Image: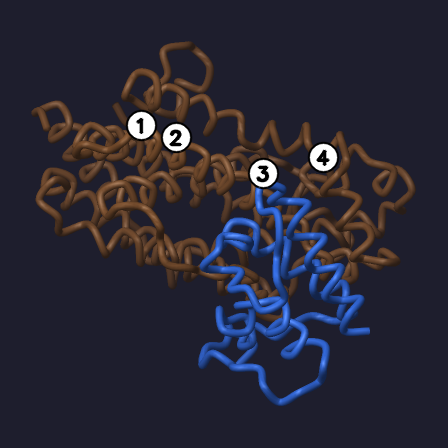
Chain colours: A blue, B brown
Amino acid sequence: MSNDVSTDIVSWLRARKPEIERIDLDQNLLESGALDSLQFVTFLLFVEQLRGESIPQDLVVPENFRSVNAIVSCFFARTEGARTSATADVGRM
Amino acid sequence: MNMNAQQFANKLSARSQSLAYDVHKYFDWPDQLPTDAFWIGPELTTVYGTEYCARASETTLKRLSQAETVNLFSIFAHGESALLQTLMKSWLRPELAEFFRYLTHFADEETKHTCFFVEFCVRYGGGVLPSRTLTLPSTFPPDVERMLGFLRILVFEEIGDYFNVRALDDQRLPELVRRVHQRHHLDEVGHIAVGWRIAAHLLASLGDVPQSTLETAKRHIESYMLSSVQGFYNPDMYRRAGFEDPFGVHAALLEHPARAAANDAILTRARRRLHALWTRGTGEESGQEDKGEMNDVK
């Protein structure tokens, strides 16, 4: 499943940034510009769709989206590795 | 900075003082809002003009309009919060000195907006919906980023006011919802008017910025506008309204030509004013359309 997810994520990113010829699985997506803040909402929804459930807001931190492997590890491999933020929304605390 | 800008800011400050209100007393919050009513007009929902709208029952469309009102107000609440942070990072800078007094009204009014949007979401939507945004460090020089920060504020407010002016007198909506839009609009008129003045001033104050950086900044704002509008398309709301395959609905709507046209309509005024800013150095338009609201505060 993880390989399929990785392929889907890379395909999504490349479709939106065709000028980026190659995306390695460990490449830093945020520093390389393959993923930027303006496309992030749509990207997050795409990851949620692949995952089949929403991603809690505390897990939406740069560290968890730094690379394709990090995304897969945090949100698809059911590991304990996901970093969290300390914030929560009013009414949901 | 000339006296006209100073006088303009003073006039807006006087307007804000005359329109000041206690946000904790301003609204009468009913225990419940009617669930058999639209909370935004169906033509403002994100499925309007598509087969999803045509196939949906009126009950489903009403549920979607209610869910998307909570989504809209949640986005506004998160946006106001980001706006305040941007504003307060810059408002003591000397180039904004003439605007400072009005900017304190601006911040006060935006804080009040946050109060009533949060109150609404907590009372009628189960809480403020989580933000899906991720803020990353800017890649622009500080003065360009400062200008872009104000432009993002402006675009956000222009988009918000698109909904305000269409909802504030819509008799299909509950009175409270209309009143929220009326109050928001009343304040936003001033914010938008002064915002374009500030943006023009910051653009004129830029140092020796390469043309390529300016072009990248223009593309950034265009992308920001599109991503802001796309934020209204929330699969969680399709699920709340009872649509099957909410992620599929979301993906289809983002590619739907009717929705692309609707998105363009939301962004028309902001794009016109941005064009005026980039080409003539002012966000004030030379044509007749939409001049009424700007003139309200002149």
Count of marks, rendered view: 4
Alpha-carbon span between mark 4 and mark 3: 19 Å
Subunit ID for the residue under disc 3: B
Mark 2 surroundings: few (<14), some (14-19) or many (≥20) residues within 10 A: few
Identify which residue is drawn at 35% across, 53% down: B138
Identify which residue is drawn at 82% across, 73% down: A1
Alpha-carbon span between mark 2 and mark 1: 6 Å
Vertical side of B94 occupied by B76: above or below: below
Alpha-carbon span between mark 4 and mark 1: 33 Å
Identify which residue is drawn at 51% across, 81% down: A84
Q: Earlier in the sequence, mark 3 or mark 2?
A: 3
Q: Earlier in the sequence, mark 2 or mark 4?
A: 2
- Write down the residue under mark 3: B167
* Residues at discs 2 and 4 both on one chain: yes
* Residues at discs 3 and 1 both on one chain: yes
Q: Are the residues at dot 4 and dot 3 in contact (C-beta closer than 8 Å)?
A: no
Q: Are the residues at dot 2 and dot 4 in contact (C-beta closer than 8 Å)?
A: no
- Write down the residue under mark 2: B215
Image x and y of residue A78, in percent: 71, 85
Numbered circle sitting on residue B211: 1
Numbered circle sitting on residue B259: 4
The furthest residue to the bottom: A80
Q: Are the residues at dot 3 and dot 1 in contact (C-beta closer than 8 Å)?
A: no
Indicate the amino acid at tag 2.
Glu
Q: Nearer the viewer, mark 2 or mark 4?
A: 2
Indicate the amino acid at tag 3.
Ala
Subunit ID for the residue under disc 1: B
Q: Nearer the viewer, mark 4 or mark 3?
A: 4
Q: Is residue B53 left or right of residue B137?
A: right
